Amino acid sequence: MAEQAAPEIHFEPLPVLFRDSDFIAVHKPSGLLVHRSWISVDRVFLLQRLRDQVGKRVYPVHRLDRATSGVILFAFSPEAASAMQQQLARSDSTKLYHAVVRGWIPEAGEIDHPLRDRDEEGSEPKAALTRYRPLATVELPHAVGRYKTARYSLLEVLPVTGRRQQIRKHLKHIAHPIVGDTTHGRGEHNRFFRERFGCRRLLLQARELHFCHPVSGETMRIRAAPEQSWDDIICRLEWNNRDA
């Protein structure tokens, strides 16, 4: 008996935020790995999907965690990718994120705390700096953990350096972990958002990428609109009149 072919899987096209002859930026959905990893058994990756969508090879310029959504940039050649990576390493560009975190953060600040690029014993911590400013706060009349009410903040976050999971680790460091972070977050708050709002994602989104185009010299500003799963939470928390 002949072996049946595996059913063909169809995906929605990735939203393209910018494209020219050198680069393409797309909106990465939460839950999708950028590329193959030995720690995952995933069979579908952003790199593969984008390559199939545009019909040519693409080269990642930077990374986003599997759980993070938003703007991600790819190059159409190794040379263009290398030029942009060098610019990112010099901090000649800006990546802005939005995050929903536990607790109230009343004013802007920065977190200067060294981090390891790899979670390995003996690896040397490296300088890491993250700046943030609050966009909105909310207090919900629900007991979560040992508190009678639940407080949350919406932040704009700017990682000045680019360490692995820097934003997630830094916000945990100041006791304001991101909601939905199953590694660095608080289980009771993650559970509250799942049960109350049906939220099963990390509430961290790469909203904007600013850089100087290495070929044309043009100043670029690429922005990702919030996806439905993000909008749903923002509306439920009554932050929909904010830049969220």
Image (tube, rainbow, N blue to C red):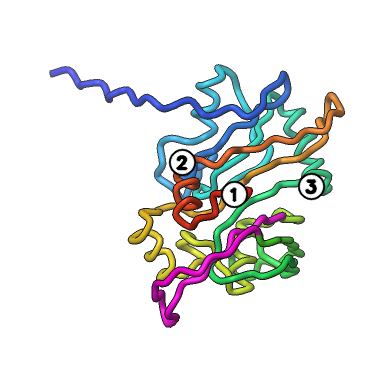
Q: Residue at x 61, y 52 (%)?
A: 98
The image quadrant where one finds the N terminus is top left
Magenta residues, as a range? 135-158
Q: Which residue is mark 2?
A: 228
182 or 152: nearer the viewer: 152
Q: CA distance from mark 2 to mark 1?
A: 12 Å
Q: CA distance from mark 3 to mark 1?
A: 28 Å
Query: Which sits earlier in the primary sequence, circle 2 or circle 1?
Result: 2
Q: Position of residue 15 (x, y in %)?
A: 54, 29
Amino acid under disc 1: Ala
Q: Which residue is mark 1?
A: 244
Q: Which residue is mark 3?
A: 89
Q: Is residue 91 left or right of residue 119?
A: right
Q: Nearer the viewer, mark 2 or mark 3?
A: 2
Badge 3: few (under 14), some or many (20 or more) residues near its Cα, within 10 Å? few
Q: Is residue 1 left or right of residue 167?
A: left
Main secondary structure type of the part rendered in magenta: strand
In the rendered structure, does residue 179 fall within the stretch colored magenta? no
Q: Nearer the viewer, mark 3 or mark 1?
A: 1
